[in-house]
Amino acid sequence: MRFIRATALVAAGLAATSLGLTACSSSDDSADSSIVTTNAGEPQNPLVPSNTNENMGGRVVDRLFAGLKYYDANGEAHDEMAEKIETADRKSYKITLKPDWKFTDGTTVTAKSFVDAWNYGAAAENAQLQSYVYSPIAGFDEVSAEKATVKTMSGLKVVDDRTFTIDLKEPSIDFENALGYAPFYPLPEAAFKDMQAFGENPIGNGPYAFETWEHNVKIDLKVNPDYPGGRPAKNKGIRFVMYQSYDTAYADLQAGNLDSLDTIPDSALTTYKSDLGDRAITKPTAQNQHIGIQTTVPHFAGEEGVLRRKAISMAINRPQIADKIFNGLRTPARDFTASTLPGFEANLPGSEALDYNPDQAKKLWEQANAIAPWSGKYAITYNSDGGHQAWIEAVANSVKNTLGIDAVATPMPTFKNIRDAVNDKTIGTAFRYGWQGDYPTMMQFLGSQYYSYSETNNVSYNNPEVDRLFDAALAAPSNAESYKLIAQAQTIMLAEMVDIPVFDYVAAAGISDKVTKAELGWNGLFDFENIEK
């Protein structure tokens, strides 16, 4: 779903979860005992659904808004605001909304609330990070063009207050399932008066209502008593507490000052099960961690870049790092998605480039040197507020020891810092990023990160044949056919080593002794509405 912030990690997580900044623990600012306190980080941007592509903002936005669908803890999609979603061909849709649904400012959610929000998100002039999500809709190309004169997509039509239609460019096997994703949320009319200000004080229609945002410290949400949907809050509200380190968050969890923590710090991975007992949670999730490098960085363009990325990939001892750093709570990556997703295939042609093979790594590095001799250092930038130091240092050491180059781990203070530099294409080094699923399909991972036109394409990957295969996978008549086309696309991506997949996640999380019920979702985030105290 997003870059792991880690979520990134965003990123989302990613995508997958990284923490924001605060100088103190949650015990310094007590919440009502009935309020659920959970770890978080400072969102990268104001809380506008179409501009939130990382999970620190995403975890808040998803509580504040209700879409046509929502996803349960297992990743299953259920109708939320949709009374009916009708289609005969997976290309043309008629949407009927449930009646009398309100935003928290008292205004009614109408078909226009959806259509206006989507058109805003798609329009080039608004530069929304999630604009690529609307690309299947007819007319997207016109509104997203650099000098667009059209501001509304031809594929969206309001029929009446409770009905609108959607026409896609091509049939899509994923589109209906995607309608619970944040960029497809509606917006009230008040949002369009000043979107920046709205994002600082959002008005939603979901199970919670916005209360306060103390930047770099906390975000408080209260229960929306008028929410009529299928995921009503079973607690009295949520406080998202922003930490500088997972160690501090874990100490608060143990002390009862934090109710849920979705990422156990490296320092506690060998002890958290004995520390927490039946309050420890372990679950494979749809999250990954990659190392990207943009082709504008010297030595990483063209054939030289392909050879160097493959060499670095084969120089990383993934099994050893997963065992020593994560106590087995990561699994070596086998593709560009995540191993828990339907259709995942572990042994794609070319996946041997993800195996630890020091001899082959050295050969490929020398082949690259024959094109242009290596110079400088290989730096991997990571956000130091996300618990990534240990594994990035281990990766850098593995590369250094195998290839004999100066490979180093380079911290940036916050997840926001690294995401801004990646988005602005000014980072100038390799960088860690992760992705955390927004809905459980492989194309959600692939399309968001590797379509040539995606705003969340970290490495500016551009291959028309891969774009074509992605399009064909979405237009496939069955999941089985879609999976075959996805495999073909990923085979090309492995041959080009577009970035370096490193790990998939086995989430390690925990709850306090004040919590009576909590479940970790399919994507590694808690099922917040259903946390009970």
Image: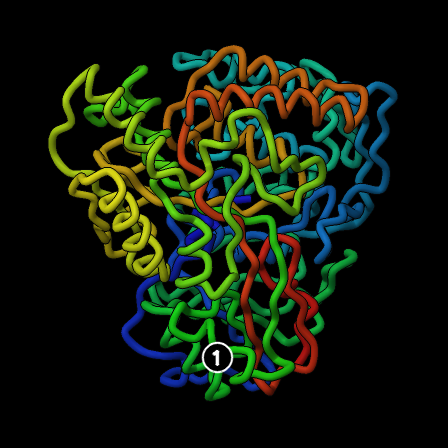
Report the side of 372 relative to 324 (left or right).
left
- Residue 28 or residue 189, whichever sits in front: 28
| Depicted 52 relative to depicted 206: above or below | above
Q: Position of residue 83 (x, y in %)?
A: 85, 42
The residue located at (36%, 31%) in the rendering is 360
Say what secondary structure mark 1 lies in: loop
Residue 364 image-quadrant placement: top left
Q: Position of residue 395 (x, y in %)?
A: 32, 49
- Residue 91 or residue 406, whichever sits in front: 406
Residue underneath mark 1: 271
The residue located at (54%, 35%) in the rendering is 335
Residue 470 image-quadrant placement: top right
Q: Is residue 12 visible?
A: no
Q: Position of residue 499 (x, y in %)?
A: 40, 32
Which quadrant would the C terminus be assigned to in this image?
bottom right
Q: How is the image coloured?
A: rainbow
Which quadrant would the N terminus be assigned to in this image?
top right
| Depicted 141 relative to depicted 254: above or below | above
The residue located at (80%, 45%) in the rendering is 79
Q: Position of residue 283 (x, y in %)?
A: 63, 62
The residue located at (15%, 27%) in the rendering is 374
| Depicted 17 relative to depicted 27: above or below | above
**Looking at the picture, which amino acid does disc 1 mark?**
Thr
